[in-house]
């Protein structure tokens, strides 16, 4: 584990060792014995899990302490809960962050961003967020805006906001060496940057050319960096996307002995490397919180254990290839079980060129991905949903709308996660631990414990072998009832992603909305799927979806009980948020 920006295609290959994130934690399930080990060492570490032998595993570190935590419990959920009690949990996000995000490296003018927003409206597609990649900056200088391309960023965010769309801007750590540039000058004056062993400011090359690297191990530097977020927030920016924070550098890697002076606690790069992105995310989170009072929305590429407290993450530069679509499922499930629940992959693939079939399958497979963003590289074919044919656009719209329908369910899962550490999307083994059939199942996932998604991730394949665990499952599309504990073959033409609802579930849903309203929907729908029980229960969370008022009790918890004839009873388990639903509607399936 050594946070790495490796442009080679990330495939199953033992010579391909490290990726962007280091989370030195694993869970073992053997017979009925479950445990977890967290090796809390952020020097370079290595894990040999079944590579040398099927009889043992091993792990070690290049340096630092042999400091590890052992968690024992009855269930995988127990282990995750203990691990996240130690390393932290992802706090409740703002509601709009659960919507659809559109990105592309290359959006480079105010007009282009406006046209993009209009395209969503014209194509009848929900969208809540547009991301601005490095081209909005003046010469890639962080915390600046290119005035030629974006003459009035505040006006742009205002217009978009009226259309229900928010902006997120990218920020890299590499700070341009340039006299007169405020970030460089302030940082130099105050010794805020990493140094060579001789005490000179260390320089490497990143997007802005010659660049220096903030010392995020210092609380003073973190405060300074965090305070810069005001520049963007004041112009209406709603979140910050941290890239290149492994840190990545173009003129060879940072040497091991580069010094981060810290708060009078110098440490070498070899010790700081794997937490550099983590500390940058922390600085960003705290800055946004202080300057906006809202729940900060941060996305980071590099992570260490505990980054979930400050940031969401995406899985970095994947490619528009089927292997990466397939890989996205275990990647997101593993991140979730490693305490990072708010994650997503670049839908459609970042590098290479996508195509209608691949994009259709990708939006289906990611429809419940906690972070729901289509992103693409500058030198790749455009992959916004309308770039292809009508069929692709229609499929795309169907699954984006499905996602929006279930946002209250996802938000409830975030509420649960913030208290227990349970991931939003989960491997089947988390809920069916004693079923040997699901132990290696990595091409299906559960959303919470009651929606099962079995996406097609192969080219030209129109049928999916779906394993349904014990119990009654209802096909979401046909409403057919199936008893589980077996594989079924489900037809899966290009417009179908097999989805099943667990019998006796209540699932909260919203009516059709193109954007996530501040404070949520006025109407709540309860989809009810009676099976063998006479009645079902569900606890639903509601708050303003924006700030920290919930910490002072400003939220509602509804306890719903539905019985087979469609009778619904509601009791308030907690009543602290003044806004209630105008309509509650039960749909019995
Ligand atoms: O060297 O900012 O992973 O999402 O579009 C490439 C440009 C830098 C890498 C990120 C990608 C982003 C791109 N960045």
Image (cartoon, grey):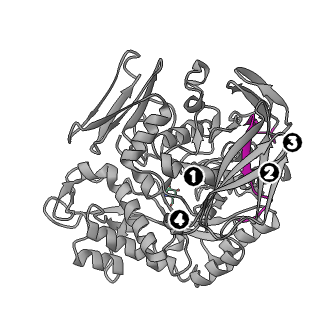
Q: Which residue is mark 1?
A: 414
- The circle on residue 565 is 3
Nearer to the camera, 583 or 377: 583
Nearer to the camera, 304 or 353: 304
Is any atom of residue 318 visible in this view?
Answer: yes
Among the 4 quarters of the image, the one containing residue 156: bottom right
Q: Residues within 10 Å of mark 1 (few under 14, many from 20)?
A: many
Tell me the distance, in whole angstroms, between the alpha carbons under discs 1 and 3: 30 Å
Residue 487: x and y, percent?
A: 72, 21
| Image quadrant occupied by the N terminus | top left
In the figure, 311 relative to 155: above or below? above
Q: Is residue 44 left or right of residue 491?
A: left
Residue that protrudes farthest toward the top in the picture: 55
Tell me the distance, in whole angstroms, between the alpha carbons under discs 1 and 2: 24 Å
**Labels 2 and 3: the sequence-earlier one:** 2
Q: Which residue is mark 2?
A: 398
Q: Residue at x 22, y 72 (%)?
A: 191
Residue that protrudes farthest toward the left in the picture: 198
Q: Residue at x 75, y 66 (%)?
A: 522
Tell me the distance, in whole angstroms, between the alpha carbons under discs 3 and 4: 34 Å
Q: Residue at x 68, y 65 (%)?
A: 520
Q: Residues within 10 Å of mark 3 (few under 14, many from 20)?
A: few
Q: Which residues are magenta?
A: 494-515
């Amino acid at each position: 584990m050594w946070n790495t920006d490796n442009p080679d295609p990330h495939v199953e290959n033992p010579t391909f060792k490290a990726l962007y994130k280091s989370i030195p934690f694993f869970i073992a399930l053997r017979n009925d014995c479950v445990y977890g080990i967290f090796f809390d060492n952020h020097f370079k570490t290595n894990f040999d899990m079944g590579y040398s032998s099927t009889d043992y595993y091993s792990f070690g570190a290049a340096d630092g302490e042999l400091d590890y935590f052992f968690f024992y419990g009855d269930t995988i959920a127990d282990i995750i809960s203990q691990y996240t009690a130690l390393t932290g949990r992802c706090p409740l996000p703002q509601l709009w962050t659960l919507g659809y995000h559109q990105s592309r490296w290359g959006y480079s003018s105010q007009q282009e961003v406006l046209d993009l927003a209009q395209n969503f409206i014209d194509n009848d597609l929900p969208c809540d967020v547009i991301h601005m990649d490095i081209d909005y900056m003046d010469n890639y200088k962080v915390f600046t805006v290119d005035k030629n391309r974006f003459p009035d960023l505040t006006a742009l965010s205002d217009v978009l906001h009226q259309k229900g769309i928010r902006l997120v801007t990218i920020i890299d750590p590499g700070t341009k060496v340039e006299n007169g540039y405020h970030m460089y000058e302030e940082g130099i004056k105050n010794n805020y940057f990493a140094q060579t062993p001789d005490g000179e400011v260390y320089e490497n090359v990143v997007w802005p050319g010659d660049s220096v690297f903030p010392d995020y191990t210092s609380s003073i530097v973190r405060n300074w960096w965090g305070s810069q977020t005001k520049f963007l927030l004041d112009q209406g920016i709603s979140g910050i996307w941290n890239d290149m924070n492994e840190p990545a550098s173009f003129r060879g890697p940072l040497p091991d002995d580069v010094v981060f002076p810290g708060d009078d606690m110098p440490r070498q790069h070899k010790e700081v490397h794997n937490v550099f992105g983590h500390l940058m995310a922390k600085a960003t989170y705290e800055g946004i919180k202080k300057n906006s009072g809202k729940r900060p929305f941060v996305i980071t590429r590099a992570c260490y254990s505990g980054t979930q407290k400050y940031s969401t993450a995406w899985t970095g530069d994947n490619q528009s290839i089927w292997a990466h679509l397939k890989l996205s499922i275990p990647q997101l499930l593993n991140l979730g079980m490693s305490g990072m629940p708010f994650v997503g992959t670049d839908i459609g693939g970042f590098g290479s060129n996508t195509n209608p079939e691949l994009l259709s399958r990708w939006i289906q497979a990611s429809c419940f991905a906690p972070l729901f963003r289509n992103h693409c590289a500058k030198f790749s074919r455009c992959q916004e949903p309308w770039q292809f044919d009508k069929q692709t656009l229609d499929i795309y719209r169907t699954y984006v709308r499905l996602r929006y329908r279930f946002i209250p369910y996802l938000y409830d899962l975030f509420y649960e996660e913030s208290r227990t550490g349970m991931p939003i999307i989960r491997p089947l083994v988390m809920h069916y631990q004693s079923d040997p059939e699901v132990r290696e199942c990595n091409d299906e996932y559960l959303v919470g414990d009651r929606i099962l998604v079995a996406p097609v991730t192969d080219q030209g394949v129109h049928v999916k072998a779906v394993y349904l665990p014990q119990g009654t499952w209802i096909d979401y599309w046909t409403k057919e009832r199936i008893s589980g504990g077996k594989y079924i073959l489900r037809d899966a033409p290009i417009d179908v992603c097999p989805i099943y609802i667990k019998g006796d579930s209540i699932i909260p849903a919203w009516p059709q909305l193109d954007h996530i309203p501040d404070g949520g929907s006025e109407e709540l729908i309860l989809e009810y799927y009676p099976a063998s029980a006479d009645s079902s229960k569900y606890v639903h969370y509601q708050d303003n979806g924006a700030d920290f008022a919930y910490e002072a009790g400003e939220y509602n918890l509804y306890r719903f009980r539905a019985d087979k004839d469609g009778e619904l009873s509601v009791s308030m388990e907690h009543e602290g948020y003044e806004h209630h639903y105008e309509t509650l509607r039960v749909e019995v399936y």
